[in-house]
Image (cartoon, rainbow, N blue to C red):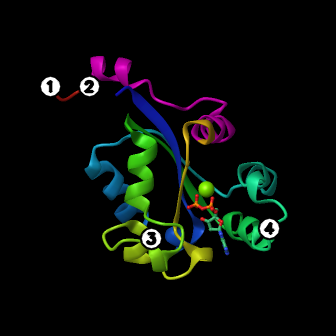
């Protein structure tokens, strides 16, 4: 199938625990390409847009406080079925229900500190990639490969 793009966030708890490399490596080893990457503290305004679907739920304020607390790694991953493959690599939302071998099972205990975000559908991916990388910064892999230094 055609390559897809999805938004991944390595959330503040994972950054604070020194898991950027470990988590990024799992996506890279599956063969997904990092098409964009940025390190920053997400603003409250952006977090509220990103998690707009959860507004009004009991965990919403805590979720926005958590994601804006300290720096995250924002990434666009690209590849065949990137959206679904990212979600299965992450594991279920609740670490207690995540399958061993997934990021959330291997490193997480609590739903409110579940380490990583990945877009859940083509519509969410388009919206979230636009929200975080609408100003640019995404590599065009088709073109980049023409100038690759390794043969
Ligand atoms: P996912 O991150 O797997 O797409 P989601 O979109 O349903 O899950 O929820 C977004 C985040 O909100 C999730 O990663 C953790 C938090 N969250 C969801 N349900 C929660 C709950 N019942 N209690 C606390 N936090 C919750
Ligand atoms: Mg979600």
- At 46% from the left and 43% from the top, the residue drawn is 83
Q: Is residue 109 left or right of residue 72?
A: left
Q: CA distance from mark 3 to mark 4?
A: 22 Å
Q: The N terminus appears in which quarter of the rendering?
A: top left
Q: CA distance from mark 2 to mark 1?
A: 7 Å
- Residue 90 x, y percent position in the rendering: 43, 61
Q: Which residue is mark 4?
A: 57
Q: Position of residue 28 (x, y in %)?
A: 31, 49
- Whole-angstrom CA distance, mark 4 to mark 2, is 47 Å
Question: Is label 2 in contact with label 1 (beta carbons under 8 Å)?
Answer: yes
Q: Residue 151: which disc?
A: 1
In front here: 133 or 39?
133
On whether residue 143 falls in the magenta region, the answer is yes
Q: Which mark is residue 148?
A: 2
Q: Are marks 1 and 4 in contact (CB under 8 Å)?
A: no
Residue closest to the eye, 67 or 103: 103
Q: Residues within 10 Å of mark 4 (few under 14, many from 20)?
A: few
Q: Which mark is residue 77?
A: none
Q: Tell which tag, 3 or 4, sits nearer the viewer.
A: 4
Q: Which residues are magenta?
A: 125-148
Residue 9 percent coordinates (x, y): 55, 55
Work out how far the residue at label 2 is from the one at label 3, CA to CA, in angstroms: 34 Å
Q: Which quadrant contains ligand 1?
A: bottom right
Q: Secondary structure at mark 2?
A: loop
Q: Position of residue 25 (x, y in %)?
A: 32, 56
């Amino acid at each position: 199938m055609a390559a897809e793009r999805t938004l991944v966030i390595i959330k503040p708890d994972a950054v604070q625990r020194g898991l950027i490399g470990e988590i990024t490596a799992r996506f890279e080893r599956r063969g997904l390409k990092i098409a964009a990457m940025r390190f920053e503290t997400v603003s409250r305004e952006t977090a509220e847009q990103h998690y707009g679907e959860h507004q009004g739920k009991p965990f919403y304020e805590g979720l926005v406080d958590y994601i804006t607390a300290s720096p995250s790694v924002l990434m666009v991953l690209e590849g065949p079925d990137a959206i679904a493959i990212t979600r299965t690599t992450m594991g279920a939302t609740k670490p207690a229900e995540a399958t061993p071998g997934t990021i959330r099972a291997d490193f997480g205990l609590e739903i409110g500190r579940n380490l990583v975000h990945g877009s859940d559908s083509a519509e969410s991916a388009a919206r979230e990639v636009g929200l975080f990388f609408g100003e640019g910064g995404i590599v065009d892999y088709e073109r980049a490969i023409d100038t690759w230094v390794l043969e």
